[in-house]
Amino acid sequence: MTYSIALIPGDGIGPEVITPATEVLDTIGDASGHVFNYVELEAGGCAIDRTGEPLPKETLEAVKQCDALLLGAVGGPQWETLPGHLRPERALLGLRSGLGVFANLRPAKLLPQLRSACPLKDDVLVSSNSEGKAEFDLLIVRELTGGLYFGERGRSADHRAAFDTETYTWDEIERTLRMGCEAAMGRRKKLCIVDKANVLESSRLWREVAAVVSKAYPDIETSFLYVDNAAMQLVRAPGQFDVIATSNLFGDILSDEASALAGSIGMLPSASLGGPLAKNGRPMGMYEPIHGSAPDIAGKNIANPLGAILSAALMLRYSCGLEKEARAVEDAVSAALDAGLRTRDIAAKGRTAANETIVGAREMGEAVIALLEKTL
């Protein structure tokens, strides 16, 4: 099978993490006979420098012709003074809306190998884990194309006041909650809906929609938390969560919080789904690590490529239908961690770890590939 993959390496460490991710895909292709044809495109700051806009029309149209999009990161301090509509981050919003991907799946899992990188105490982790382990495994389903990030915004005439509007429709909420329910059905059948219904009218609509959607999923245990309580519960008892479904803004914040508990934001992948099917008949998806462009470490070979590699694994699973190959990539990442390999962000914090070896982005990617080749 041949797959057409749009690549947007982007800015900062984006190119450094996308390279090992594509090398992993090529290793999968060599072993399985699948072919990954890459279409490299520009978006973000690099596109602004070349074309004057963060998401050139030709980039979006080219992505639409592919089976999936793998993206590195966008942004950097050199573009921070630009008007809002010309900031690199507008490329992400444009891609999400242009592709119609309305739900962002962000798995956050504390692997046993990274226990030392988690800031929580053992008793905190164990107390909320049904198996009594110092681990957690949760999934945040974040609505992606509505809410505060896409609502009406503006400034007063004297520019001394500004506003951003949170707007949601029934359909936007319903499709996100259904995706959360479907995800929960394949996991531990627990769904927590996070909102601010004691204050926000849009959140009260989320609860009204949830009351209807939940009737179609009687096997799922549905609960609700206000976002401030949810943020506290994540650090107090993360093991209580299975699937969290929430709005664009709340999902953005909570998933970054969860990434810190998992050891590093550099470890977390994401899959944005929900748009029209690609030409191969599978879901068209946008896959990216959730970290930013990290310009302060760009070009130093110290970035963590595992989030990007695990994003490629999600792409194999959802957009290519290659479950066996996706699991092989995830197992190779776990094996690299078992071997004690660490990028600086996931090394033991403030203690000596004789069994750990600090490696760079290239070396980590090479190790994952070597371990992958042994199992294919």
Image: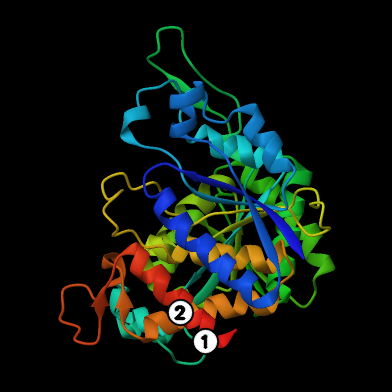
- The answer to whether any part of residue 262 appears in the image is no
How many numbered callouts?
Answer: 2
- Give me the residue at 76% from left, 52% from top: 174
Residues packed near mark 1 inside 10 Å, few (<14), some (14 to 19) or many (20 plus): few
Whole-percent x, y for residue 310 in the image: 52, 67
Whole-percent x, y for residue 93 in the image: 58, 37
Quadrant (top left, top right, bottom left, bottom right) of the C terminus? bottom right
Q: How is the image coloured?
A: rainbow
In the picture of the structure, the residue carrying the numbered disc 1 is 374
Look at the picture and state if 338 lies above or below 145.
below
Q: Label 2's element?
A: helix
Residue furthest out toward the bottom = 131
In the picture of the structure, the residue carrying the numbered disc 2 is 370
Q: Circles 1 and 2: CB distance less than 8 Å?
A: yes
- The answer to whether any part of residue 321 appears in the image is yes
Look at the picture and state if 259 lies above or below 335.
above
Quadrant (top left, top right, bottom left, bottom right) of the N terminus? bottom right
